[in-house]
Amino acid sequence: MPFPGDDHTGARIAHHRKRAGLTQRGLAQKIPYSYSLLTQVESGHKPASPDLVATVAQALCIDVTALTGQPYVTELQQDRLAELIRPIREALDLYDLGADPQISPRPAPQLVAAAQRLCQQVRATKLHDAARDLPGTMAEITTAAHRTPSSELWAALSSTYRTAHDVAVKLGYYDLSTVALDRMDWAASRASDPLLSAVRQYMRALVYFREGEYTIGQRLISSGQGLLEQSPQTRERHAVTGQLHLGASIIAARARDQDAVTTHLTEARSYADRVGEATDVHWLSFGPTNVAVHAVSANVEMRQYGEALRHAADVRIPKDWALSRAAHFHIDQARAQMEAGRSEAALKSIVTARRLAPQQTRYHSGARETIRGLVHLSRRTPDTLDHLAAWVGL
């Protein structure tokens, strides 16, 4: 939902204050800051300090990121997802307090299964279910790992942190995703699992990719590859190695390095030929299908839309593939189709993505921008497109 005036934190404070039915004086009376300062912050004449932002968020009963730039707060509230973010933040913040005396954790095998179930929920794009179950499971495994340390429990805890990252990214809470990755590294080091640590570096690289820091992203990929040298030559190591090459291919594509894209995709394909569809390895969906999908994504990033569509025509999504990955492919395909002037095909691809993963598609920046572009291109928008535009808050 667009904010009135300039896009800055003060303008967002004013927007949410008005939604709450408060005047500037009314809000100032609820916080330990002066009316004068509040008016200057809202007008953009003074910056909003972290303390002021946190206090205003508490007074308005919203998340801090609604004021600092979380872009989909209205839709999140409609889906009852916004209210689930704060418990995840709290669970991530209590990682180093040791065992909670009020928690009696289940046996380790059940906790490991619970962590795996959270990953499966995200892959099935059941974001509400994952976000609801995550804090309790995280707290329970944290207590168990502190009471009876084992590599199995630390690995399970690292997995829950990875799920927190996935949920945060899909809902646009990028600050929270960074915290989750830090916690993932903390737990992975205690699990003594170099594969987990390498996966974490891969995910960190994608964070910097989103921020446009391609050099740092490439360094993180290289760091992940170095960590893998500590692991024996197994199918799991090959799958993680291949996934690192896929991540590197997308970073190289955004940096417009065609040679590097080709090299990384070729390396990934060689590993995929060895391991097959390795969807059971750290929930990566690595294999020949993912290599083909990344070839589409890389060409989209390089704005080679005709080449992207040529690769897309050869993609065959397995029936048991993660819905989150399948939806992402259709979103990329839609962008290429729109840029190639195939608006009807692009609309069908977005509709398919929505059918497969409605919550993920609603909050996916690529889907939102494609819908925005289709609306702009259409002299008279079809009913389906009007509905999609309203659905994502455009």
Image: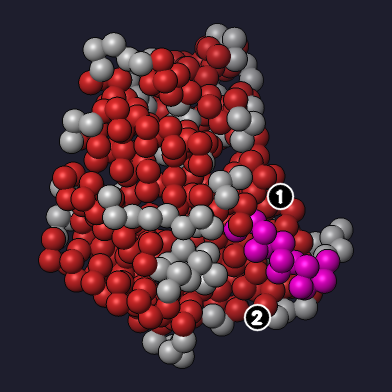
- Which residue type does callout 1 highlight? Asp
Q: Quadrant of residue 80?
A: top right
The spot of residue 284 in percent (x, y) is 47, 64
Left or right of 176? Residue 301 is: left
Where disc 2 sits, the SS reads: helix
Picture disc at residue 151: 2
- Indicate left or right for 277 with 161 as reference: left
- Report if residue 43 lies within the magenta region: no
- The image shows residue 362, relative to residue 254, as above or below, that is above
Measured from the top left, where is residue 374 in percent x and y?
A: 29, 25
Residue drawn at x 67%, y 63% as measured from the top left: 115
Q: Residues within 10 Å of mark 1 (few under 14, many from 20)?
A: some
386 lies left or right of 188:
left
Is residue 107 magenta-colored? yes
The disc label shown at residue 148, or none: none
Where, by quadrant of the figure, is residue 192 drawn? bottom right
Looking at the image, residue 160 sits to the left or right of residue 340; the answer is right
- Of the numbered discs 2 and 1, the one sitting upstream in the chain is 1
Residue at x 13% of width, y 61% of height: 258
Residue 86 visible somewhere in the drawing: no
Name the residue at 77% across, 73% down.
108
| Magenta span | 106-119
Amino acid at pointer 2: Ser
Mark number for residue 133?
A: 1
